[in-house]
Image (cartoon, helix red, strand yellow):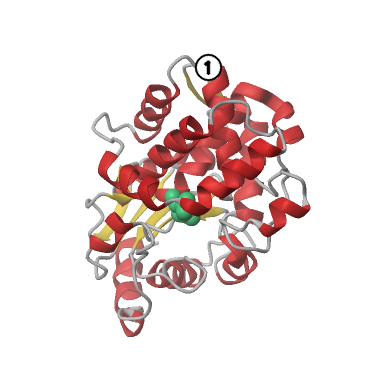
Amino acid sequence: MDYQSILENIFREIQPYAREGRQADYIPALAEVDPDRFGICLRLMDGQIFELGDSLTRFSIQSISKVFALSIAISLEGDEIWRRMGKEPSGSAFNSLVQLEYEKGIPRNPLINAGALVMADIMISRLPNPEEFFIEFVRKLCDSPSVDYNRRVADSELSTGYLNAAIANLLKYHHNINNGIDEVLRLYTLMCSVEMNCRELSQAFMCFAKSNEPFRHGGVELTKSRVKRINAIMQTCGFYDETGEFSFLVGLPGKSGVGGGIAAIYPSLYSIAVWSPRLNAKGNSIMGMKALELFTTETSESIF
Ligand code: GLU
């Protein structure tokens, strides 16, 4: 398959959408990002990569970090994690308070903010230095020692993160957070602030495509069965309340972030990362979703 020409065709085909939507600005530092960037990187099992555009420009991975947090939390807690959160699609916004109130402080799934705050709490309880552990784990996953937190973005989010603070308080009220709220919010926003480029992100997601070769690092072990579960959760919960639509259009397990990134995998075939900051009303990258829809259509390589 001539993947490079397929990517080039897709880039041409998505141009009509180039000015639709806008970048996230509820986190002040993200409003400064040039909205007209576009990068994509496809990585095959044998390590071959095909990329285009700004695939080497780093961006804020935001909620994509929740998949890495889940990998750690599942390794630290095993099935106990499911006492503290569910594994059902939320059908509501990633920062919704309403559902959490109805469901008495048990987040619907790990890939919404409430779930990630509980995972940050687990990491703080279990690890001597969770901040260091998380970034080292991510560096190992993407095989890039210079990947790091962007503390300015994290501070910027913390300074206006009233809704996440409300979620953390509700979780604490229901005894689903054991540590201090400030500490949990700090780790959560730091995890979201990690910056990677499409090439690094596609490498980081290889561990979810390659379940036959379990990834191990510092006590985190992504066994075949854990990868199966993480992929299932990405498939059903990875795109906020647009997960059904992403499944319908693209047909791959994946995760998006409000920085405009999307990472997705086809088990035993490839991982793919795309970045374009302009978002739709649900918080997903417009060009990113369109590019992935065209990619699985033109290659006939979707899991369905
Ligand atoms: N840090 C962002 C928030 O909590 C992450 C949102 C996202 O990417 O979905 O609002």
Q: Position of residue 58 (x, y in %)?
A: 25, 49
Secondary structure beneath disc 1?
A: loop
> How many other residues sit within 10 Å of disc 1, few (<14), some (14-19) or many (≥20)?
few
| Amino acid type of the residue tagged 1 in the rendering | Gly
Quadrant, the C terminus: bottom right
Find disc 1 in the rendering and name its residue: 219
Locate residue 177, reporting x and y percent: 63, 32
Most foreground residue, 64 or 273: 64
The residue at the far top in this view is 128
> Residue 161: image x %, image y %?
44, 51
Q: For the point 28% across and 33% down, which residue is it?
A: 144
Apparent side of residue 104 relative to residue 142 in the rendered image (left or right):
right
Above or below 278: residue 75:
above
| Residue 100 coordinates in the image, percent (x, y) | 70, 51
Q: Is residue 162 above or below residue 45?
A: below
Q: Give the residue furthest to the bottom.
A: 16
Is residue 119 in view?
A: yes
- Given residues 33 and 261, the one toward you in this image is 33
- 34 displayed left or right of 172: left
